Amino acid sequence: MTSKIQLAHDPKKVVRHLLSALPERSKEVLTLRFGLGKSTKQATLEAIGQEYGITRERVRQIENHSLDAIRKSDQMKTDEAVFTELQGVIKDMGCIVSENDLLDAVGSTPSIQNHVHLLLVLGEFFVQAKETPEFKARWHVDESVASSVEGALQSLYKTIPGDEILNEAELIDRFLENLQDLNEEYKKEEMLKRWLSMFKNLDRNPLGEWGRVSSSAIRAKGIRDFAYLAMKRHGSPMHFSEVASAIAELFDRRAHVATCHNELIKDSRFVLVGRGLYALKEWGYKTGVVRDVLRELIEREGPLTREEIIDRVKKERYVKDNTILVNLNDRKVFKRNTDGTYSLV
């Protein structure tokens, strides 16, 4: 949550003073356009044009002319201190900040936020960058810092493979590696988190873990994705009934036990490792029955003793020793050597 900042200057009072430099219709157009009146909804050019019986292009001209008139007015010079204060606020927030974070910090109501927005548009210190597929709408007061931060975020994104998940501390450490040229004063954790929040290609999942927004581990949509997150948080194999309970506890999302079991069976991210027990494939578990695990183990490591086989198989399957031995005695697949080890037929 963004920390609130109490401005020394009243944005509404300042804006009223600035608008006094304009004729009535210009004042009304800006009031509607920026949501400065009773309604905080910012009117479109079309809506204003319909109200006054003029074209949207004419409304745009009035808006631009009105903004220029205020910038050149005596009132603007009188209220210079409020713009200096806002410049300091943005610098303290990291020199570049998303529009939503900035307005949330300085405005307790939509009305105050709209008045601050107009001040940002008017001020010569402030540069607005519109929303793009990568970034949210944002404001900055230092071009070099803004460029470094945006470049670092793009570089950070490239270091995170499609399905990799990082905890917040790991992500911040990796982010700092891409910000080496930036002054130390900007490397505060609060600033780093604020910069991360304005980058649309990375996000957090419900467990607070970070990754690419395209990853199903970040934007969980169905039972399978929530089951994956629950099991990853647990860190070891779980019975499907435990997975269903964990989904309800962690995500406040009801998951029927039978439905959960069916979904785990269908998803290649999960491996059945025992009676109703599932593990994540990424943990090194392999698909297949015990016989398949035995075959692959001996193919990979060569002849092994009975004890070695039991030890290794039980790291991949939650099965009894006797189940392993029964499968190992399949003479069509395995043979016992004279030295007591087992190999493939």
Image: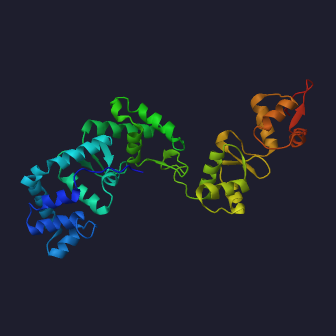
Image-based side of 15 in relation to 248, left or right: left
The answer to whether residue 124 is seen in the rendering is yes
Choose between 47 and 168: the one closer to the eye. 168
The answer to whether residue 140 is seen in the rendering is no
Q: Please give the count of numbered marks on the rendered protein.
A: 0
Question: Residue 181 sits in which quadrant?
Answer: top left
Image-based side of 150 in relation to 53, left or right: right
* Spot occupied by residue 294 in the image (x, y as percentages of width and height): 81, 38
Choose between 214 and 253: the one closer to the eye. 253
Choose between 316 and 336: the one closer to the eye. 316
Choose between 319 and 186: the one closer to the eye. 186
* Spot occupied by residue 313 in the image (x, y as percentages of width and height): 79, 37
* Spot occupied by residue 52 in the image (x, y as percentages of width and height): 15, 74
Question: Residue 321 sits in which quadrant?
Answer: top right
- Image quadrant containing the C terminus: top right
Residue with the most extreme right position: 338
Instruction: Name which residue lies at 81% across and 43% down.
Output: 290
* Spot occupied by residue 2 in the image (x, y as percentages of width and height): 39, 50
Image-based side of 253 in relation to 173, left or right: right
Instruction: Name which residue lies at 26% across and 65% down.
Output: 42
Instruction: Name which residue lies at 38% across and 32% down.
Output: 179
Instruction: Name which residue lies at 81% across and 33% down.
Output: 311
Residue with the most extreme top position: 339
Q: Please, which colouring scheme is shown?
A: rainbow
